[in-house]
């Protein structure tokens, strides 16, 4: 297995393991259960953010399962949270002096809690301690130690191994010139086979890792620390069948890439380790299977088709999401979100939607109509009287591209890229073209594709609802259907999940494009979303959660024989299955969604580069999935 951003030396230090298991549910002594849980993890948090996150997670019914603290002049936190399904009581205390820790340890033991994670760090040269305790509802016998010398650790190891205990957490740190250890031992009621090793060099760890893999063990807990300039490792292995993955010695970018890719595959992070090396801060993680996406029978076929499409239609980055029967069955990214730092795309990467925005606007219009807040059969000027008099079209004529409003004047029309500054609202955006005459069409012709016409729809919506189009989108779709990445693009407010936008150069390389404001065409080509949320949008539409079947039928009704374009969607039939779809293309974007209601199937494809062939590719993926 190769990693595109590692030197050969780093690659030799990087280790991955995948073990297939039978899905099930088991809590056990490891506190790493199988099954499907909501989870979250955060890193690089300061004290304030960390405390807010703890409060937020507790309110959401989550509990921490692993915490890391990097000291120095200030504390930096990382934490992993998991759904607290049994509403187990927990308490997390860090930044304790040795005396304070002793007091807290006795208090928690007397209350019937047991530790699952111990931690130690230096802050401005002074050592502090902490631990995560959970209510010991299983009544496991347990012991924990800290500040053990190497010889003391060996004695405790033999003692508690002989008593039928097993270690579940090991921490190592320097006190003066000596390495000290902390360890949590728990009664091995289930008779699990286990192994624990420490003070391994990188090469020794790699050899031991492979040995344990061959024997059917998985990594439970890992620790890395320095002795001089030598990087050492300690780890606990347990013998059990569970689908899992583990990587170590990753940079922050590499860790983020693996985190995103593994989340897409259906894994959750259970153990995180952040440590110093001569090369800088490095990360290690252990992930366990959380969803059954890896079992989907079409997974390998879809990946093969995606790689072939990426080869024949090169995009800097592409993400695919496939939903079927109300579940995300496939989620994967191919390529880079940022070629400058090696950040990879994944299913949650945010892309421009281009003209897929029109399909969203079509749904939005009919949803407002179902609520009695909008009428698609009304004249546009009934809502927005500020439009010139020659705009005699109705809303549905604009949505179906029958309003005879012009589109781009050419492939070099500057409005394709956007405007240098945001426009105030949709009416202001429409003033960039609204005074131009309507398009003259040949006899018996009605259809003229127009992104501009959708700006007029947005102007009518804004006047009808007395709020911005982005607020309407958020209030009617993004918030109620939990689609947080679906919004109008704000090129001045981009977060870490956003992909950069690219163009393919003549020499085959990719050049980074500068974003302009798409505010003039939010409704027709200015939205953004992740492939994950776009597929979930389609899934809820297919399940008739957003619109009733009657409203969907009306939205998908083609007004004439001039094209297959309905209200924001193209409708058709493929191998006897009716579908509705929409593609989009603009600088830095190529997007596509297809919904096949009879198969309860939705496919979403999003790219950060303008490429060809995406309509055919999306239909090919849909056909391969049903």
Image (cartoon, rainbow, N blue to C red):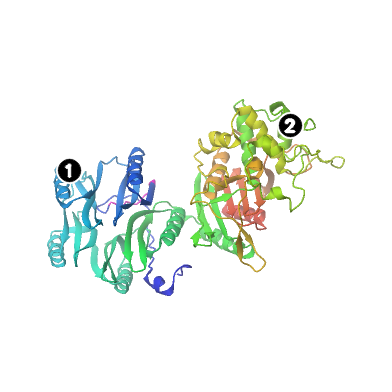
Residue 399 visible in this rendered orientation of the protein = no
Looking at the image, which residue is at 66% across and 53% down? 615
Q: Tell me if 420 is positioned left or right of 180 in this view.
A: right
| Contact, mark 2 vs mark 1 (Cβ under 8 Å) | no
Helix or strand or loop: what does disc 1 sit on? loop
Quarter of the figure with residue 466: top right
Looking at the image, which residue is at 53% across and 38% down? 478
User: Nearer the viewer's eye, disc 2 or disc 1?
Assistant: 2
Which numbered tag is attached to residue 387? 2
Packing grade of label 2 (10 A; few <14, some 14-19, many >=20) is many
Packing grade of label 1 (10 A; few <14, some 14-19, many >=20) is few
Work out whether mark 2 precedes mark 1 in sequence or the reverse, and give the earlier one: 1
Quarter of the figure with residue 392: top right
Bounds of the magenta segment: 31-38
Residue 215: percent from left, percent from top = 30, 68
Looking at the image, which residue is at 84% across and 41% down? 441
Residue 202: percent from left, percent from top = 32, 71
Q: Tell me if 436 is positioned left or right of 600 in this view.
A: right
Question: Which is nearer the eye, 160 or 148?
Answer: 148
Q: Which residue is mark 1?
A: 112
């Amino acid at each position: 297995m190769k990693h595109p951003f590692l030197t050969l030396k780093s690659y030799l230090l990087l280790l991955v393991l995948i073990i297939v298991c039978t899905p099930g549910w088991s809590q056990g002594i490891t506190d790493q259960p199988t099954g499907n849980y909501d989870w979250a993890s955060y890193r690089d948090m300061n004290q304030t953010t960390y405390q807010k996150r703890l409060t937020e997670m507790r309110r959401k019914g989550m509990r921490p399962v692993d915490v890391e603290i990097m000291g120095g002049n200030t504390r930096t936190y990382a934490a992993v949270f998991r759904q607290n399904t049994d509403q187990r009581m927990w308490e997390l205390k860090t930044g304790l002096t040795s005396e304070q820790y002793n007091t807290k340890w006795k208090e928690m033991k007397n209350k019937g809690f047991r530790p699952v994670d111990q931690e130690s760090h230096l802050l401005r040269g002074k050592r502090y301690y902490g631990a995560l305790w959970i209510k010991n509802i299983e009544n496991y016998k347990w012991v924990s130690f800290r500040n053990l010398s190497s010889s003391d650790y060996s004695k405790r190891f033999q003692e508690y191994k002989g008593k039928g205990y097993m270690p579940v957490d090991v921490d190592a740190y320097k006190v003066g010139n000596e390495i000290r250890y902390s360890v949590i031992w728990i009664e091995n009621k289930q008779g699990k086979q286990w192994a624990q090793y420490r003070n391994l060099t990188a090469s020794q760890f790699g050899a031991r890792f492979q040995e344990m893999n061959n024997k059917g063990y998985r990594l439970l807990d890992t620790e890395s620390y320095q002795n001089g300039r030598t990087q050492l490792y300690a780890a606990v292995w347990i013998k059990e069948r569970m689908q899992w993955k583990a990587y170590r010695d990753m940079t922050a970018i590499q860790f983020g890439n693996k985190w995103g890719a593994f989340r897409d595959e259906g894994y959750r992070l259970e153990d995180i380790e952040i440590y110093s090396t001569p090369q800088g801060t490095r990360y290690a993680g252990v992930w366990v299977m959380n969803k059954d996406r890896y079992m989907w029978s079409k997974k390998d076929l879809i990946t093969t088709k995606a790689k072939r499409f990426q080869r024949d239609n090169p995009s800097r980055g592409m993400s695919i999401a496939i939903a079927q029967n109300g579940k995300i069955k496939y989620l994967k990214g191919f390529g880079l979100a940022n070629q400058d730092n090696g950040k990879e795309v994944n299913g949650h990467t945010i892309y421009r939607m281009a003209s897929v925005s029109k399909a969203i606007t079509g749904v939005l219009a009919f949803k407002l109509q179902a609520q009695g807040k909008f009428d698609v059969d009304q004249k546009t000027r009934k809502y927005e009287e500020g439009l010139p008099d020659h705009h005699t079209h109705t809303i549905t004529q604009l949505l179906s591209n029958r309003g005879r409003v012009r589109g781009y004047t050419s492939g070099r029309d500057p409005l394709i890229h956007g405007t240098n500054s945001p426009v105030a609202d949709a009416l202001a955006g429409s003033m960039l073209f609204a005074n131009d005459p309507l398009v003259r069409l040949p006899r018996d012709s009605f259809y003229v594709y127009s992104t501009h016409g959708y700006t007029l729809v947005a102007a009518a919506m804004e006047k009808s609802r007395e709020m911005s189009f982005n607020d309407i989108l958020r209030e009617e779709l993004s918030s109620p259907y939990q689609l947080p990445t679906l919004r109008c693009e704000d090129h001045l407010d981009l977060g870490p999940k956003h992909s950069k936008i690219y163009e393919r150069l003549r020499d085959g390389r990719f050049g980074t494009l500068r974003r302009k404001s798409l505010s003039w065409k939010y409704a027709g080509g200015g939205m953004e979303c992740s492939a994950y949320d776009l597929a979930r949008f389609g899934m809820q539409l297919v399940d008739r959660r957003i619109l009733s079947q009657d409203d969907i039928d009306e939205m998908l009704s083609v007004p004439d024989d001039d094209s297959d374009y309905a209200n924001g969607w193209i409708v058709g039939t493929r191998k006897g299955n009716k579908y509705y779809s929409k593609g989009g293309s603009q600088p830095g974007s190529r997007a596509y969604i297809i919904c096949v209601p009879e198969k309860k199937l939705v496919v979403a494809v999003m790219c950060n580069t303008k490429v060809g062939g995406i309509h055919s590719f999306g239909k090919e993926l849909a056909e391969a999935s049903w």
